[in-house]
Amino acid sequence: MLAVIKTGGKQYIVKENDKLKVEKLEANEGDTVKLSDVLLVADKEIKIGMPQIEGAYVEAKVVRQAKAKKIRVVKFKSKVRYLRTRGHRQPFTEIQIVKIVA
C-alpha cells in the first residue's frame, strides 16, 4: 500500500516500514503519531482526496528528535567591508511508518 501524506507544509510518498525525516513534530521518542492529512492512497485501486481522503490516516512511530547539519548563512557586500556570518541547524523528527489506513 502506498500513500501521499502532507506534514510540515511538504508532501511525502510513503509505504509501510519507511523511515523519513519530517519537520519537527510535537512528540517524544517512541510515541505513535497519527497523520490525518492523507492526499492519496494506492492499493488495488487509487483513491484521490479533494483535498484529503475522509477517514484515512497514517500511523507513524517517532524514532528520534534531532537537528540537521549546520548551514552557514553569509551576507556580503563588496567594496563596503560588510560581512555577516550566521549558522542555523533545522530541527527535524525522524519517523517510521507503521500502518496506512484507508
Image: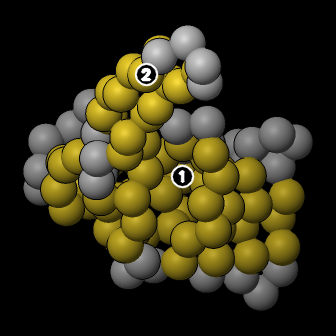
Relative side of 86 to 81, left or right: left
For the point 82% across and 40% down, which residue is it? 51
Relative side of 67 to 5, left or right: left
For the point 75% across and 60% down, which residue is it? 40
| Residue 85, x across and y down, in percent | 36, 28
| Residue 58, x across and y down, in percent | 48, 57
Compared to 83, does 70 lie above or below?
below
Q: Secondary structure at mark 1?
A: strand
Instruction: Name the residue beneath numbered marker 2.
Output: 83
Mark 1: amino acid: Tyr
Choose between 66 and 7: the one closer to the eye: 66
| Residue 74, x across and y down, in percent | 46, 31
Instruction: Name the residue beneath numbered marker 1.
Output: 57
For the point 83% across and 80% down, which residue is it? 45
Q: CA distance from mark 2 to mark 1?
A: 48 Å
Residue lying farthest front? Answer: 79
- Labels 2 and 1: the sequence-earlier one: 1
**Residue 91 visible at all:** no
Q: Residues within 10 Å of mark 2 (few under 14, many from 20)?
A: few
